[in-house]
Amino acid sequence: MLSVFSKTILFITSYIPLYTILFVQYCDFSISLLKQPLLLMLLAITIVAFLMLIIFLCIIKKQKVLIETIEIRNVKPLKESNLTYLLSNIIPLIAFNFTNRQQVISFLIILVVLMMMYVKYSLISYNPMTELLLYTNYSAEIYKDDEKVRDITLLSREKFYHQNTFFNIKGIELDNDFWLVKEKTKS
């Protein structure tokens, strides 16, 4: 199970594209970056967040304690999570003027509220940065003795092409219904 700290890291890293867009949008390329302290801070946050994501994924992938083999069926790519994320990024870009201090504070309040919901409801599968690192989110059903146990979300570099095929996977249970796939075999 992921800690609140781990979920917070995943939330912060999920907004790397937004940080990058804001940097490009508000950067004055005609003057030195050192004379733009807020943008320098935004660039530093982006770099640190990306490094945190890579370190987090490396640490998780090396875990051996939580690995189990489970049978899954009805594996489908999760596409709606990307749309949800996209909407939560477009609204700040349209709604806020980041040159105005009150607007920046309002944006930060919304970001904190989003983070609280993200952590509380374990919405850790909503992270487009994992897609950039060649991971894909899938929905799947866990089966035991030919009986459905529950629905889960998978994060995997392995591709699942055939929806109605049975697979055995070894993975790490990151959260109640969220697994990182380490290895898959077709049944």
Image (cartoon, rainbow, N blue to C red):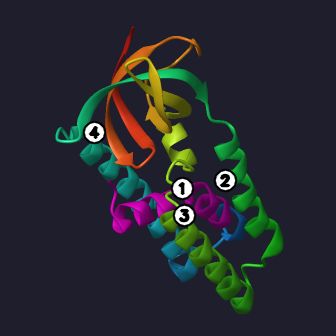
Q: Earlier in the sequence, mark 4 or mark 2?
A: 4
Residue denoted by label 1: 123
Q: CA distance from mark 2 to mark 1?
A: 10 Å
Q: Is residue 165 above or below residue 42?
A: above
Q: CA distance from mark 1 to mark 3?
A: 5 Å
Closer to the N terminus: mark 3 or mark 2?
2
Span of residues in magenta: 1-23
Q: Nearer the viewer, mark 3 or mark 2?
A: 3
Q: Is residue 47 left or right of residue 132?
A: left
Res. 44 mark = none
Q: Tell me the distance, in whole angstroms, between the alpha carbons under discs 1 and 4.
A: 20 Å
Would residue 79 be counted in the magenta stretch?
no
Query: What residue appears at the point 39 percent right and 52 percent down from the top-left corner?
Result: 53
Residue with the mark numbered 4: 61
Of badges 4 and 3, nearer the viewer stands: 3
Q: Check contact, mark 1 vs mark 3: CB within 8 A.
A: yes
Q: Which of marks 1 and 2 precedes in the sequence?
A: 2
Q: Residue at x 46, y 36 (%)?
A: 155
User: Which residue was labeled with disc 3?
Assistant: 118
Disc 1 residue type? Answer: Leu
**What amino acid is labelled 4 in the image?**
Lys
> Label 4 to label 3, Cα distance in Å?
22 Å
